[in-house]
Image (spheres, grey):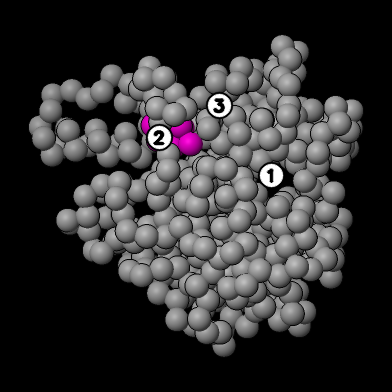
Amino acid sequence: MHRVVVTGIGVVSPVGLKLEDFWKALVEGRSGIGPLTLVSTGRLNGCIVAEVKSFDPAAHFTDKQAHLMDRFAQFAVVAARSAVSDAELQISDRLALEIATVVGSGTGGHSTLDDSYLKVYGQGAARVHPLTIPRLMINAGASHVSMDLGLKGPTWAVATACASGTHAIGQAFHMVRSGQAPVALAGGAEACLTFGSIKGWEALRVLSRDTCRPFSKTRSGMVLGEGAAMLVLETREHALARGARIYAEVRGFGMSADAAEVTAADPAGEARAIEAALKDAKLGAENVDYVNAHGTGTEMNDRIEALAIYNVFGNRAAELPVSSSKGVLGHSLGGSGALEFAATVLALHTQTIPPTANFEAPDPACMLDCVPNVARQTPIGIAMSSSFAFGGLNAVLVAGRA
């Protein structure tokens, strides 16, 4: 079994496309949440989102390339390019045959789907764009990353709603650890800020009308976001042999299914995923120094997650630093776990815990150390990143200081 390390990170986020901008905003608790501008809001209920405002396809693709890709796939490719550049990874013809590519997405090409439905059902069009199917398929992100970078090893997509990015990184981690691939490019991407998608989320009555306040007593719901993160994972031997900078070591990955309700989370299922990740890492709960929580900002989900943390960590849960990145990034569904694991890796690398932004008052049902509003410099040896998805699908990654 090989030790697996993170050597490159690339992001497309509501607070910037550069890694330093992304991390600076997280540490400062500077939110990327604001009014929706991507689509008309005339028939939406006061929509607040976390948009990637600085993304210009023309800056990254030719017209022909951009024409082939939905917005989510463009995000995936740009994040992947950035991750490879950040890792200073030279992809030889031989290495290209071995690199694994795993990309998670919860909804795939939602912009393409929305546009097609508008034309067919709303405008009575007889035909849609000839590339509608290749653009909307959930594996389009993984496929375009593979084609863009010439990666010919094992390549596939993961679709587990809000846990997609975490599942993708976890599966890539297991491949590299087992020796199936010396290097993997893994993460998640989502671009779900369309009229149809937002209408669907409105129907669930979980969206906030002002901002996301994870674990705060005054929280009013989740905020939809978009974005992508891709990470370069490689065996420690491979990284050291090429003199790579190592951000952190991936130590374990755990999964579980609630097998209960499609939208209501189960603390027992979440706890099992946490315990599975710790077991995989050969660590105990007492070894964890920081948790980057799923922390959606909905009343019920935050309480259930807090209960799951108490189920695993016992009385220590009240003192364990637990913060959510969604007050800054919103909830990018299949992209969220990848963005949050990137934040977790950077927390280990810089020994800095990013705060829970927008926190106002503690909830007696979520008595956690939420690192409210102000980042914390503290020794972090082991950190955890959790994602808990609709359908009761849970995924947890554990990483350690390099």
Question: Can the viewer see residue 69?
Answer: no
Is residue 277 found inside the magenta-colored segment of the image?
Answer: no
Q: Amino acid at mark 1?
A: Gly
Q: Amino acid at mark 3?
A: Val
Label 1, label 2: how far apart the Cα atoms are: 30 Å
Magenta range: 70-75
Q: Amino acid at mark 2?
A: Asp
Q: Which mark is residue 56?
A: 2
Element under label 1?
helix
Q: Residue at x 54, y 69 (%)?
A: 357
Q: Residue at x 58, y 73 (%)?
A: 373
Percent of width and height locating residue 117: 22, 37
Q: Residue at x 50, y 31 (%)?
A: 141
Q: Residues within 10 Å of mark 1 (few under 14, many from 20)?
A: many
Is residue 74 found inside the magenta-colored segment of the image?
Answer: yes
Q: Which mark is residue 145?
A: 3
